[in-house]
Image (cartoon, rainbow, N blue to C red):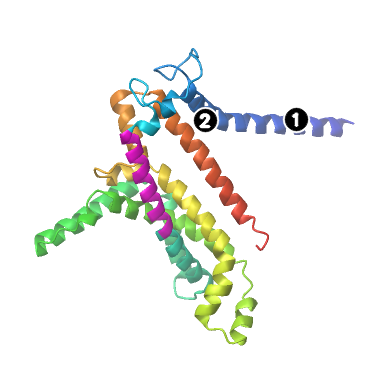
Amino acid sequence: MASSTKNQAFLLGYRAYMAAFFIFLAAPLVAAGSFAFNDSLFPALPWQGFTLDWFFNDSEPKLGMFHDRRLLRGLYYSGVIGVMVSLLSVFVGTTNAFLFVRGNFPAKNFFYILMILPLVIPGVILGISILVMASNIANGVEDRFNLELEFLRPGILLVVFGQFSFVTTITSLVITARLKKFDTSLEEAALNLGASRAQVLRTVTLPFLRPAMIAAGIVAFLVSFENFNTTLFLVGSESPLTITMYDRMAKVGSTPVLNAVSFFLIVGSGLLALISVVIQRDPKS
């Protein structure tokens, strides 16, 4: 009887803890999203009424996010950067997966640790390091050869290279985990039937890896899209959305249009994350 009472108390405490944990996670998101619909010039209580002006209104003082050219430009740059980072990261992550799962070379464990090292390096340090290295290379080439390497100057390409340096680690780990589950006898059977290695890769191995590659690409896009610390040091005049929002907050202060952007990003990120989960639950896996 006493044991049953203890178990029930433990179960009740565990459920209360889990409920408090998820409320703690969700409360800031709900608060940020709700003020996007508040008919007020400031994201604060009391509630002034429901409105969609912060999304669709085309005039001041309630200029909606879909009519704010600077926010839309930042959204566009973030999308472009995210797509470029995703494509590069998935390609290199796939090659890394084959390298560390199928390859056998000296100091393999050391290079594997080196690959995952960017995940534990603070984004600020990573951003500063990449900026200093790129600037030194660009300055050295310009001084010696009188050649300007624009892609090593702050701008979209340098942001892509900076984010790629740590996002690739994530895609590599996701695709590596999938490749480890692959039955190599399928490749051997295809080779015995006369298929070339390129045909085996295209028709057998890559289709098996496709769910992980798509999911890794989605994760890479989301990580790139929301990145701030590293991007802040590498950005030029083409500011992505996170930098644009930070600049707006610093100069104007918080307004409900930023809450509208936050709500849009919360919904978009949630949908992409759901798609990623569904893809990885492919029955063929």
The residues colored magenta run 69-87
Residue at horizontal 42 percent and vertical 28 percent from the top = 56
Please say if 238 is above or below 116: above
Q: Amino acid at mark 2?
A: Leu
Please say if 266 is above or below 106: above
Residue at horizontal 41 percent and vertical 53 percent from the top = 83
Horizontally, is 10 left or right of 195 in the view? right
Is the stretch drawn in magenta largely helix, strand or loop? helix
Q: Which residue is mark 1?
A: 12
Q: Which residue is mark 2?
A: 29
- Nearer to me, 145 or 125: 145
Rendering coords of residue 236 (x, y %): 25, 45
Question: Disc 1 or 2, which lies upstream in sequence?
Answer: 1
Closer to the camera: disc 1 or disc 2? 2
Disc 1 on helix, strand or loop? helix
Residue at horizontal 53 percent and vertical 46 percent from the top = 272
Q: Amino acid at mark 1?
A: Leu
Q: Is residue 81 magenta?
A: yes
Report the Cα–Cα distance between label 1 and label 2: 26 Å
Q: Is residue 156 magenta?
A: no
* Residue 124 in view: no
Rendering coords of residue 232 (x, y %): 31, 42
